[in-house]
Image (cartoon, rainbow, N blue to C red):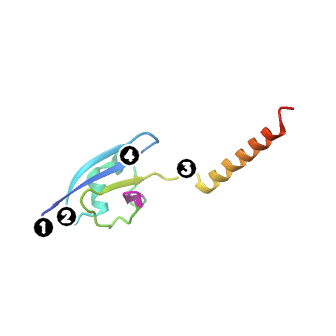
Amino acid sequence: MAGAELLIEVVYSPAAGQVDQVSLQLPDGARLLDALHASGLCHRHGLDLATVRAGIWGRLQPLHTLLRDRDRVELYRALRADPKEARRLRQRHARQAAAKAAAGPY
């Protein structure tokens, strides 16, 4: 399979509901980092390659991971809130609303 080309899709969502994707053809033996360089998405969105978090098909992977044909490379945004803390706050609000509803209108 020498000289084979890999079809790769690189995707980044800068905000909810927005998607920037690039389809690439890379040589066999290409790595995740090669796809990020070739896509230009890091440069376009001002992301630092040294600190970017990326994965393949929804799973975080190191940048030296070898790619396979038809892989979907994804760039991940930084979390704005701790998921555990957000869940605690939602539960607290739900408990307060339930207590208020049980107390009745008077």
Q: Quadrant of residue 31?
A: bottom left
> Which residue is more in the foreground, 36 or 4?
4
Amino acid type at mark 2: Asp
Between disc 4 and disc 2, whose residue precedes? 2
Between disc 2 and disc 3, whose residue precedes? 2
Q: Position of residue 11 (x, y in %)?
A: 35, 49
Between disc 1 and disc 2, whose residue precedes? 1
Within 10 Å of disc 1 (Cα), the crowding (few <14, some 14-19, many 20+) is few
Mark 4 vs mark 1: in front: 1
Residue 28: which disc? Answer: 2
> Which residue is more in the foreground, 50 or 70?
70
Q: Which residues fall within the magenta stretch?
A: 52-59
Mark 1 vs mark 3: in front: 1
Please say whether residue 53 is one of the residues in the magenta stretch.
Answer: yes
Q: Total of numbered circles in the picture?
A: 4
What SS does tag 1 mark?
Answer: loop
Separation of residues labelled 4 and 1 (CA atoms)? 34 Å
Which quarter shows the N terminus? bottom left
Q: Which residue is drawn at 32% across and 67% down?
A: 65
What SS does tag 2 mark?
Answer: loop
Give left or right: position of 11 versus 15: left
Q: Where is residue 20 in the image (x, y as percent from the top left)?
A: 35, 43
Q: Name the residue under label 4.
A: 45
Between disc 4 and disc 1, whose residue precedes? 1
Q: Name the residue under label 1.
A: 2
Mark 4 vs mark 2: in front: 2
Query: Taking 102 as reference, is 52 above or below it?
Result: below
Q: Mark 3 points at which residue?
A: 80
Separation of residues labelled 4 and 2 (CA atoms)? 27 Å
